[in-house]
Image: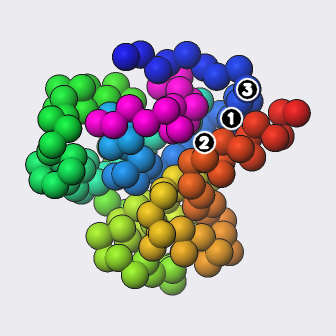
Amino acid sequence: MNHAVFPPSLPVVAAGQRVVLDTQIVMDWLVFDEPRVMPVIALVESRHLLWTATAAMKAEMLHVLGRGVAARYEPDLDRIHAAFERHCELVPEPVLGMARPRCTDGDDQKFIDLALHLASQGSALLMSRDRAVLKVAKRAARLGLEIVAPDVWIQRQTLSTQ
């Protein structure tokens, strides 16, 4: 299934806007074909949003795919590797020299840290549906990082074009 059609209801995002997608969002896209995230994915596939991740984030996703509910969906690993190759910029783990908000789920801290690092260099946002990550949003906003659920972000973008 090709999702690269740019949704007409969403504006073109500022050039160079980086987005960090947490594991669940990537799984919604590449394993579950969740329609609610496809407007965001269309922006990633068309390079209007620049998906950025680390090797540890990719490794976590592959680990999650090998167990539990995701494994029962028999994910297409070729599709997943191809999506990372085609649409994701893998960058080194950031070394943050700043005080930063801490996530109650230590496994999710890497998403917050990368997004904070990217936000300190320009425009970036972190998309997640994970409650522990979303709880950090107010503290992260003070450091210039927007953390938002994809459906909320899509709704904001749609409203801004009306």
Checking the image for residue 13, the label placed there is 1
* Nearer to me, 6 or 57: 6
At which x and y percent is residue 105?
35, 76
Checking the image for residue 9, the label placed there is 3
Are the residues flagged by discs 1 and 3 in contact, CB closer than 8 Å? no
At which x and y percent is residue 58?
25, 48
Q: Residues within 10 Å of mark 3 (few under 14, many from 20)?
A: some
Depicted 55 relative to depicted 104: above or below? above
- Residue, disc 2: 17
Secondary structure at numbered mark 1: loop
Sequence-wise, the earlier of marks 2 and 3 is: 3
**What residue lies at 48% left-to-right and 58% top-to-bottom?**
129
At which x and y percent is residue 5?
55, 16
Identify which amino acid the numbered label 2 is placed on. Answer: Gln
Identify which amino acid the numbered label 1 is placed on. Answer: Val
Q: Is residue 42 magenta?
A: yes
* Nearer to me, 152 or 118: 152
Identify which amino acid the numbered label 3 is placed on. Answer: Ser
- Looking at the rendered image, the quarter that the N terminus falls into is top left
Are the residues flagged by discs 2 and 1 in contact, CB closer than 8 Å? yes
Compute the Cα span from label 1 to label 3.
12 Å
Q: Is residue 21 magenta?
A: no
Residue 87 seen by the camera: yes
Depicted 140 relative to depicted 60: above or below? below
22 lies left or right of 46: left
* Nearer to me, 121 or 143: 143
Compute the Cα span from label 2 to label 1.
7 Å
Depicted 88 relative to depicted 141: above or below? above
